[in-house]
Amino acid sequence: MIFDLTDEQKMIQDMARDFAAKEVAPKAAEIDKNHRYPAELVAKMAELGLMGMMVPEDQGGAGMDTVSYVIALEEISAACASTGVIMSVNNSLVCDPLQRNCTPEQVEKFLKPLASGQKLGCFGLTEPNAGSDAAGQKTTAVPDGDSWVLNGSKNFITNGNEADTAIVFAMTDKEQGTRGISAFVVEKGTPGFSIGKLEDKLGICGSSTAELVFEDCRIPKDNLLGKVGEGFKIAMVTLDGGRIGIASQALGIARAALNASKQHALDRVQFGKPIARLQAIQWMIADMATKLDSARLLAYRAAYLKDKKVRFSREAAMAKLAASEAAMWISTKAIQVLGGYGYTKEYPVERNFRDAKITEIYEGTSEIMRLVIAMSELS
Ligand code: CAA
């Protein structure tokens, strides 16, 4: 494994860092405060090729590798974690499964507009009674003539409120268990498909988290993604990639919190010297930097393996586990380093702390990550 970034990866890092510093960071506090979906930033990310980074250019994407995606997503998330997750879901949970499973007609109809960022997507797997136990799908899809008819609901769906296109998992044969789940593409505006409850959340307040409701929702037969019964595997392979995305989002949050801590430690004078000269602070900064670097190396490794097209479930789970727990730990310590200032909305670390928590939950909790790692270690 090579640790140096290629010239192309460095270029992408510079581009994403520049965009994040000039256009994303100045708006992050306002987006968080007003719970505002950053439509103008998503449009700009589309222009920059950040919404379908790993999709080949002839399919509407930017044709980059997964390491480039990790690098760019860390930069965007360091500025604004809400903007980061919008980007992550479109890339990892929508474009990736489409790219792997679309027919040539579906590439034209669904993938190209999503990979170019003209449209936005969401991933409908979770249900009120199918969270960590993703196989417990209650939504059904029944064939009827030239259509599938969907009934049920999905919840906690990132981008759900704004998405033009949803990938939806539903039970097509209950008797078959995980092999009875199939994947579908459902477009906004389809009769019988509506948006239900919108969640009011602790963090990532600029991204929507919505309920998707299907009531006798009739979609064309051609909107089946992959084959009947392949849905669960499509979802699991997709989530392996998604976990690399969330690891990258967590890296960004953690880095922002560490940078704020370093700046404050150098500026803040107590007992006649900058607090950066106190060992109590130095040890916190050292542990923060070590946890961040360890997690980043795991994320790069998982991305590298994904690009090599070998199974990377274990490595993606390790990267997400390490990066999300690092983000939570580092942002907690950041508030400690900033003291009373850190607890106020005047400084970004309280937002980092609130945004970090979700990375330990969505796209597989830390407990599910440990389960995936243990199953691999013990098999
Ligand atoms: N890659 C390929 N195949 C896989 C796989 C993977 N990563 N994981 C499982 N499979 C296959 C298995 O090999 C098995 O195949 P066979 O039928 O051929 O034997 C099949 O899938 C069933 O596997 P399991 O028996 O292991 O399935 P399980 O029901 O025990 O579940 C689990 C395993 C790891 C707990 C899984 O349910 C899981 O990952 N749960 C967490 C779900 C999750 O991450 N949800 C997040 C939703 S997305 C989100 O957060 C919303 C958002 O908008 C951000």
Image: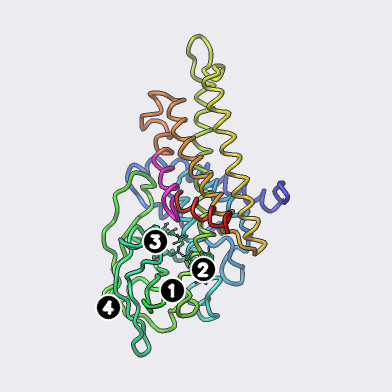
Question: Which residue lies under the disc numbered 2?
Answer: 97
Residue type highlighted by circle 3: Asp
Residue type highlighted by circle 2: Pro
Instruction: Compare marks 1 and 3 and give the one earlier in the sequence.
Output: 3
Residue type highlighted by circle 4: Asp
Answer whether labels 4 and 3 touch (C-beta < 8 Å). Answer: no
Examine the structure image and report whether residue 252 is included in the region drawn in magenta: no
Residue labelled 3 has its Cβ within 8 Å of some atom of ligand 1? yes
**Dot label at residue 133:** 3
Q: Which residues are magenta?
A: 354-366
Question: Which residue lies under the disc numbered 4?
Answer: 216
- Name which residue lies at 45% across and 40% down: 26
Secondary structure found at label 3: loop
Residue labelled 1 has its Cβ within 8 Å of some atom of ligand 1? no
Residue type highlighted by circle 1: Ala
Instruction: Compare marks 4 and 1 and give the one earlier in the sequence.
Output: 1
